[in-house]
Image (cartoon, rainbow, N blue to C red):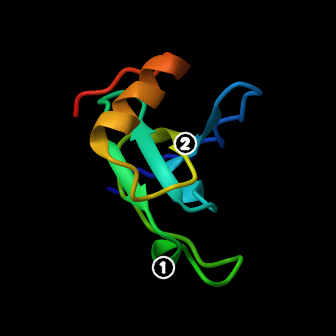
Amino acid sequence: MSVFRTFQAVASTQALDTCNFDQIEKPGTYVENRWGTLFRMPLEALPRRKHARRNAVTREPWPVTRLTSDPDVPVSTARGLAEKLGVWVSF
């Protein structure tokens, strides 16, 4: 028996650029909101076509917050940006 779950998109907020991991459309440095994991998404890693998506198979969605548009920002700077935004990190 297969169980499929569908999740609604995480709504963006004014202060934070937040979405699900598979909805990332802009390059930058992101933090996974529940575990505080850092993700670097260079332009080359993004889908080239509008309907092309990354496929992450998880039990629950991965909400991520974009810290900066620079995917190569130093880790210490990313920590500082997260602190200013009030985003918990574990890197």
Instruction: Specify the farthest residue to the right.
Output: 14
For the residue pair 58 and 25, the one nearer the viewer reads as 25
- Few, some or many C-alpha atoms within 10 Å of disc 1 (few <14, some 14-19, many ≥20)? few
Q: Quadrant of the N terminus?
A: bottom left
The answer to whether 81 appears left or right of 52 in the picture is left
Of labels 1 and 2, earlier in sequence is 1
| Residue at 22% across, 34% down | 91
The amino acid pointed to by label 2 is Arg
Disc 2 element: strand
Q: Where 42 falls versus 87 (above or below)?
A: below
Residue at screen point 39% across, 58% down = 72
Q: Is residue 49 above or below residue 79?
A: below
In this rendering, the answer to whether 79 lies above or below 52 is above
Residue 62 found in image quarter: top left
Residue 4 spot, x, y in % from top left: 46, 52
x, y percentage for residue 10? 64, 37
- Number of marks drawn: 2
Q: Quadrant of residue 50?
A: bottom right
Query: Dot 1: what SS?
Result: helix
Residue at numbered disc 2: 66
Q: Residues within 10 Å of mark 2 (few under 14, many from 20)?
A: many
Residue at 77 percent of width and 27 percent of height? 14
Kind of residue at disc 1: Glu
Q: Which residue lies most toward the bottom here?
A: 48
Q: Which residue is mark 1?
A: 44
Task: Judge by depth and name the residue closer to the eye, 27 or 55.
Answer: 27
